Image: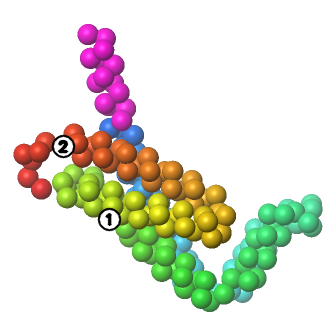
Amino acid sequence: MKTFAKSRLADRLLHDSFLLSVMLKAALGVAQILAAIGLAITSQSQLIRFVAQLTASETQQDPTDPLATWLLSAAQSFSIHEQTFYVLYFTGHGLLNLGIAATLVARLRWSYPVSIVVLAAFVIYQIDRFVLTGSWTMIALSLFDVLIIALVWREYRQLDPHRPT
């Protein structure tokens, strides 16, 4: 009896983890779309002023602060081509995240394998970006996506095979 109760508890925890990860994917999608809008309407001079204000207290305390100086340098060298890339990237990635979340919450049978493929493509792209840039954020995002792939696969296997799509 205890084994059955533990199994049901584990199932419930995994399902709740799935729902939480889908909601986090949706929140990330909204944040990415808002970031794209923000970037689209922000000029380079506005970006530089914003970063300078953001880092002002830190650079007053320590003018050689590595993070503050890196942020300022990045803002100053942020080209229109990079801005366009990030607007398109954040928009596309955000819409895909929202689409994945919406179709999984709706429990559309076809969305589970499609989501796994899309998330796997995200992982491949993010690992490629890590290799090119060394950004550990890409590794963190990839690990999150791999976790979601595992949870989506588990949920897909739990679906009633006779349930209409």
Residue 13 vs 100, above or below: the answer is: above
Q: Secondary structure at mark 1?
A: helix
Name the residue at 30% across, 22% down: 7
Marker disc for residue 159: 2
Count of labels shown?
A: 2
Q: Nearer the viewer, residue 65 or 140?
A: 140
Name the residue at 61% across, 59% down: 137
Query: Circle 1 sits on which residue?
Result: 99
Give the residue at the far top of this rendering. Answer: 1
Of labels 2 and 1, the one closer to you: 2
Q: Secondary structure at mark 2?
A: loop
- Percent x, y of residue 130: 60, 64
* Circles 2 and 1 in contact, beta carbons < 8 Å: no
- Callout 2 amino acid: Leu
Marker disc for residue 9: none
Q: On the rendered image, what quadrant is the N terminus found in?
A: top left
- Percent x, y of residue 61: 92, 60
Name the residue at 11% across, 45% down: 161
Q: Is residue 158 magenta?
A: no
Residue 97 visible somewhere in the drawing: no
- Gap between marks 2 and 1 measured at Cα: 20 Å
Decide which of tag 2 and tag 1 comes sooner along the chain. Answer: 1
What are the residue bounds of the magenta stretch? 1-14
